[in-house]
Every structure is written in C-alpha cells, then in structure tokens.
Image (cartoon, rainbow, N blue to C red):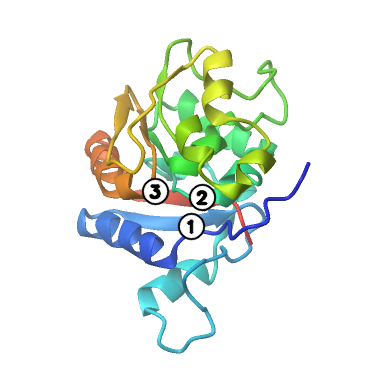
Amino acid sequence: MPEIETEGGISGSALLGICHQLKEAGFACAISTVAGERPALVDVDLSDEKIHPDLRSLVDDPLAIIDIRASDYCALLIPHHLGAAQDLLNCDVLGDVLAAFLKQHKPICTIGYGTYGLCARQSHGDSSNGWQFAAGRLVTGVSVSDECRHPHFAKLPIVLQDFVEESGGTFVECPNDQVCVIVDRNLVTGPNEASTGVCIHNLLYLCQDDGQTAAPLLNGLG
C-alpha cells in the first residue's frame, strides 16, 4: 500500500479546542493512539517550552488503543486527521473497540478523515470488510468531491464514500468546506474539521444521561 506523503497528524490547536469543549461541559477526556505513542501534531512543536500546558498534558502519555475498555468511557471520538485513512483503517484493534462501544450502545463520533476509522476490521468476527453498522445507517465524512481536490487522493487505500455505500450504509455528501453534522441514533459524523464543534455538541447531548465522564480521542499517528 502506498504511503500518504503528506502531514497526516492532527492539528494541535484543534485537539486543544476539542478538549476544552469537553472540559467546559464537565467531561474529562483521554487520548489514545495505535500503540500508545505521542500523537503527531501538524502545527505544534512539542519541544517548544511555550506550548499550552493543557495540550502537553494531553499528549504526553496517551493510551494504546488495545488498552481502551468501552465500559470505562461514555463515548468514542475520532477527530479529523488524514492519518486515520491509513493507520486507523488498518487497525483491527480499533475494530474490536468499535464493536465493544456498539454492543454497549455508547455514542460514537467521527469527523472528516476520522470516519475512515469506522471501516476498521475486527481481529475476529463475521464482518468481512470491517463495516459493523446496520444497512442504511446515515454517515458522512470526506466526500469524493472533497478528496479529489487534494494530491494524496490517488494514494488513499479506499474511497470512503464508495466503501460506505458498498457496505450498505448511506453516505450523505455535504457541501465542501461547509459546517455539517449527521446524527443517526448513537452515531454522530461530520465531513471536515470545520464541523468539529457542532459534532461534539451533538455528541455531548447524547452523553448527557450517561453516568461516566470520559471520552477517549483517537489519533492514528505517532
């Protein structure tokens, strides 16, 4: 599989904004990466002494995805970052985590390229292509019309929109660069980083009756 030769990490400022939004709503958060490595931040130098202390504390000691227990958290959030199209898509441990959250009927939110994480296969089970959702489930993420504007399009392992539709889901194509959110039962999805705030607002609404107050954030790069 060809590597995506571009910065695939998450925006440090976006990550900080996510965590502040959760904190203001009374929720703690934990960050998880594939192997417990520091997440790759595309706009922050972690060696900079002026880095925001809240951001440093978040990224210094992330969980490995294999250590996530759905019973410990009220929701799962996979934010927008290009690396998800490769590292999370091919992470069967994430597929197992998704299965656990779905079994416990806990909210799941993905944004932009983070929606590739919903396609992760389980390490064992009946799902042949990784899609674990019922037929017709409404989902959005980066659309074909959005992806094809970028030079990494030809190196993406799958076309998200095609994968969802071929797996029986319903992909909702949102206007490029516009804020949008799709909520279908306990699944919240958005098409791009600009939609992060409204997606989290809807995720928090779904979580408000849950007794726990931590939502792991997944980032697929080290």
Residue 84 got which mark? none
Residue at mark 1 to residue at mark 3: CA–CA distance: 8 Å
Figure quadrant of residue 9: bottom right
- What amino acid is labelled 2 in the image? Leu
Q: Nearer the viewer, residue 8 or 130?
A: 8
**Disc 1 secondary structure class:** strand
Figure quadrant of residue 94: top right
User: Could you tell me if the residues under marks 1 and 3 are in contact, i.e. CB atoms within 8 Å?
Assistant: no
Please give the name of the residue rendered at 55% of the width and 36% of the height, measured from the top-left corner. Answer: 116
**Disc 3 secondary structure class:** strand
Please give the name of the residue rendered at 36% of the width and 73% of the height, measured from the top-left corner. Answer: 54
The residue furthest right is 1
Q: Is residue 215 above or below residue 102?
A: below
Q: Nearer the viewer, residue 181 or 200?
A: 181
Residue 110, given in percent of the width and then of the height, sits at 43, 39
- What amino acid is labelled 1 in the image? Ile
In this orientation, does residue 98 appear?
A: yes
Residue 67, given in percent of the width and then of the height, sits at 60, 49
- What amino acid is labelled 3 in the image? Ala
In this orientation, does residue 91 appear?
A: no
- The residue labelled by disc 3 is 215
User: Could you tell me if the residues under marks 2 and 1 are in contact, i.e. CB atoms within 8 Å?
Assistant: yes
Q: Is residue 185 above or below residue 180?
A: above
Q: Is residue 67 above or below residue 188?
A: below
- The residue labelled by disc 2 is 218
Residue 163, given in percent of the width and then of the height, sits at 58, 23
- The residue labelled by disc 1 is 31
Q: Residues within 10 Å of mark 2 (few under 14, many from 20)?
A: many
Please give the name of the residue rendered at 48% of the width and 10% of the height, measured from the top-left corner. Answer: 135
Residue at mark 3 to residue at mark 2: CA–CA distance: 10 Å
Q: Residues within 10 Å of mark 3 (few under 14, many from 20)?
A: many
